[in-house]
Image: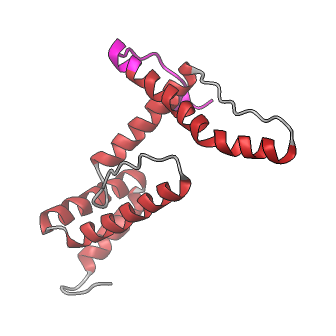
């Protein structure tokens, strides 16, 4: 396993651990509640008995959730577009998709209509990300920008 994927011991306050565990236990309960009617319909249709099961292995699920939180936070700190966080409150995939589509439309609109200071900050984030991830491409873009004539949009 690569070094950057190995687990390391991290201390966390008891109240934050309790919050993580409650989030992790909440998801299976919601999934069970949503899937139960479908299982009942299937059982009634063919007479066989079906079960819904999801086991929670807290240490593994804690690591996964903390990893997702860290990655989300890293992206959220230096976004390349205006970011919106909108609750859905439903496990229905159609409703989730509807909220996701709305968020994407609004993010694009707000990014386009953002004041100059915001658009400049977003461009700086993109530039820093390119410099960190692909230094050669950053140098090429920088050189092309310096060679461009005023008013050129190529």
x 47%, y 32%: residue: 65
* Residues shaded magenta: 1-18
x 37%, y 58%: residue: 130
Eyeballing the image, is 23 above or below 108?
above
Eyeballing the image, is 2 above or below 119?
above
Relative image position of residue 59 (x, y in whole percent): 54, 19
Coloring basis for residues: secondary structure
In depth, the one of 66 and 80 nearer the eye is: 66
Q: Is residue 72 shown left or right of residue 25?
A: left
In depth, the one of 40 and 50 nearer the eye is: 40
Relative image position of residue 63 (x, y in whole percent): 50, 26
Relative image position of residue 23 (x, y in whole percent): 45, 29
Magenta includes 14?
yes
Can residue 102 be seen here? The reply is: yes
Q: Is residue 43 shown left or right of residue 66?
A: right
Relative image position of residue 111 (x, y in whole percent): 26, 67
x 86%, y 46%: residue: 46
x 44%, y 30%: residue: 66
Question: Most extreme residue toward the right, as rendered?
Answer: 47
In depth, the one of 4 and 24 nearer the eye is: 24
In the picture, residue 145 is in which quadrant? bottom left
Magenta includes 114?
no
Quarter of the figure that contains the C terminus: bottom left
Eyeballing the image, is 45 above or below 153?
above
Can residue 13 be seen here? The reply is: no
Question: Most extreme residue toward the front, as rendered?
Answer: 44
Quarter of the figure that contains the N terminus: top right
């Amino acid at each position: 396993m690569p070094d950057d994927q190995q687990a390391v011991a991290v201390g966390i306050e008891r109240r934050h651990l309790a919050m993580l565990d409650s989030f992790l236990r909440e998801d299976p309960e919601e999934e069970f509640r949503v899937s139960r009617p479908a299982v009942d319909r299937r059982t009634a249709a063919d007479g066989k008995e079906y079960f819904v099961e999801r086991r929670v292995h807290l240490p593994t699920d804690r690591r996964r959730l903390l990893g997702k939180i860290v990655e989300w936070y890293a992206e959220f700190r230096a976004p390349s577009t205006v970011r919106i966080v909108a609750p859905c409150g439903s496990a229905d995939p159609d409703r989730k998709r509807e909220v996701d589509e709305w968020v994407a439309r609004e993010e694009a609109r707000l990014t386009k209509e953002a004041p100059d200071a915001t658009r400049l900050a977003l461009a700086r984030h993109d530039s820093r990300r390119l410099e960190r991830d692909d230094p050669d491409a950053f140098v090429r873009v920088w050189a092309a920008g310096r060679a461009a004539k005023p008013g050129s949009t190529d």
